[in-house]
Image: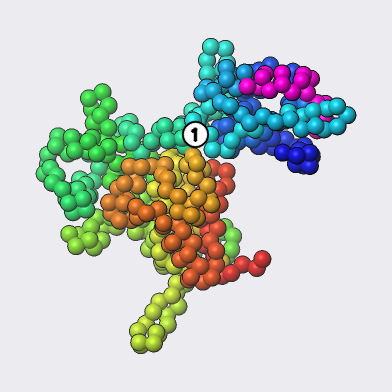
Amino acid sequence: MNRTELTDLINSGENSGVEFKRDDIRPEALAREMVGFLNLEGGQVLLGVEDDVTVSGLTRGPAEAEEWVMEAARTQLSPPTIPYWETIEWGDGKIVGVVSLPRDAPDKPHKVRRGSAWVTQIRVGTTTRDATREEEARLYQQSGHLQYDRKPVPGSSFSDLDVGRLVNYFRDVRGQECPLETDREGWERLLVNTDLMDENRGRPIPSAGGLLMFGVRPNKYLPQAGITAVAYPGSEKDYGAKERTVIRGPAVARLSERGDVVETGVIEQAIEFARRNIAVQSEIDDGGRRQDRFDYPLEAIREAIINAIAHRDCTIAVTDIELSIYSDRLEVISPGRLPNTVTVDKMRAGYRASRNELVKDVLRDYRYVEATGLGVPRKIVLGVREHNCTDPDLIEDDDRFIVRLWKEVQDS
C-alpha cells in the first residue's frame, strides 16, 4: 500500500472493511476487530488513525508495534493467525500501521478470547459484535466444517420420507438393489449408510438433505425448503402480480424406468412456472419446422434454479429461494453468501465447490447437475449470451446470491 491508497482509505472513513484504532488499546480489543474481519470478507485495521479521521501516528516504534500485533493475533485469536503488516510514512514523523486480514480465511469461525472463553464475533457495518447461534453455524458451514445437509432433523422420522421416491432413486436412478417398501428396518439401514438418515442415540433420523430431496412435506421441519415464485407485470415488485405461488415438496422428480418424469418435484415445478410466465415467439425454420424461442434460454433458467437448491445456505431459516420474473429480467435469489473460497469470477470460470455435498451428489445422480462444474460458464453465461447477446449478472449481495438474466441488452 502506498500513501495515496492510504489517504483514500482514511478519507472514505470506517466501513465493513476498514477500522481506525490507536495502538495503545488493549490487545483483546485489537483481536476483536481482526476476528470480525476474518469472519466476514477480510479488512484492514489502521493503527494510528483516530475516529475523526485525523492521523495521530503510532505511539511506539514500527518494530515494537509489529510484535504487539503479532502477539495479539497469536494469543488472543483461535485459531491463531498471521496478519499482513506494513507501515506507511504519513509525514511530520507520523507512521500509520496497517493490519490486513484476508478475505478467504479458511478456518471460520475465528474466535477471540474473552476471559477463559472463546467467542465468535462478526463485522456488521462499522461495528464488531457477538455472532448469533445461526450466524456462527453459517460460518462453520462456509468453511466446510459443518455440512448442514447431513445433520439430523429433530422430530422427523422415516415416515416423513417418500418411500416411492426412494425406491425410484435407488432402484431406477442408481441401479442398485433396495429393500421392499414395507421393510422399514432395511430402509433405515440403507439410508443411514448413505447419509440420507443419521443415527442419533440409536434412533435413525432423516438428515436435512434426505428431507430436502425425498421428504413428503419438507417444510414441516425445514421452513426454508422450497421456492417462492412470482411473475410481475412490470420491472418492479408489485402487489398485482400476474402469478404468485409457493412451491413445496421434495426437490427431485419421480421417474419412469426410461427416465421420463412421472411425478414432478420442486425443480420441475419451478421451471414450468418460468415457462408459462415468459414470452415465447414461434418461428418456422428452413426445414419448415416450428421453433419456439423464449425470452430466456430454458437451460439457463434450469441451471440457475438447480444451483440455488444445491448451494443455498440452509442455516438461514424461513427464507425460500426466490424466482422472480419481471418485464425486463428474470432473477433467481438463493439465501446465503457464496461458500468459502468461492468468488463470482471463480464461478464464471467453472470453479467447483459446494455447500451441500449430499444434496449435490443426489442431484448429480439424477443428472440435474454435471460433474464438470461447467454449468454456470456454459449454460448460464455462454447460453444467455448466445441466446440474446446479453450478459447475466452474478451478484453476491449481503446474505444472498442473485442470478439475473436480462431480456434485452442493457444500455451502458
Asked if 70 appears above or below 214 in the picture, the reply is above
Q: Say few, some or many: other residues with alpha carbon within 10 Å of mark 1 (under 14 / 14 to 19 / 20 or more).
A: some
Locate residue 145: give its quadrant.
top left
Examine the structure image and report whether residue 235 is included in the region drawn in magenta. no
Residue at 42% across, 42% down: 355
Extreme residue in the top direction: 116
Instruction: Specify whether residue 134 is in view.
Output: no
Give the colouring mode of the picture. Answer: rainbow
Examine the structure image and report whether residue 68 is included in the region drawn in magenta. yes
Foreground pick, 38 / 65 = 65
Asked if 342 appears above or below 384 in the picture, the reply is above
Q: Amino acid at mark 1?
A: Pro
Residue at 50% across, 41% down: 341
Percent position of residue 143, x then y: 46, 35
Locate residue 263: give its quadrant.
bottom left
Residue at 14% across, 34% down: 185
Instruction: Specify whether residue 185 is in view.
Output: yes
Foreground pick, 216 / 410 = 410
Asked if 362 appears above or below 33 in the picture, the reply is below
Q: Pointer 1: what residue?
A: 106
What segment is highlighted magenta in the picture?
A: 52-70
Quarter holding the N terminus? top right
Percent position of residue 265, x then y: 31, 54
Quarter holding the C terminus? bottom right
Percent position of residue 183, x then y: 12, 39
Percent position of residue 367, x then y: 30, 56
**Disc 1, SS:** loop
Foreground pick, 55 / 120 = 55
Q: How many marks?
A: 1
Viewed as shown, does residue 214 lie left or right of 188? right
Locate residue 158: give its quadrant.
top left
Residue at 28% across, 46% down: 214
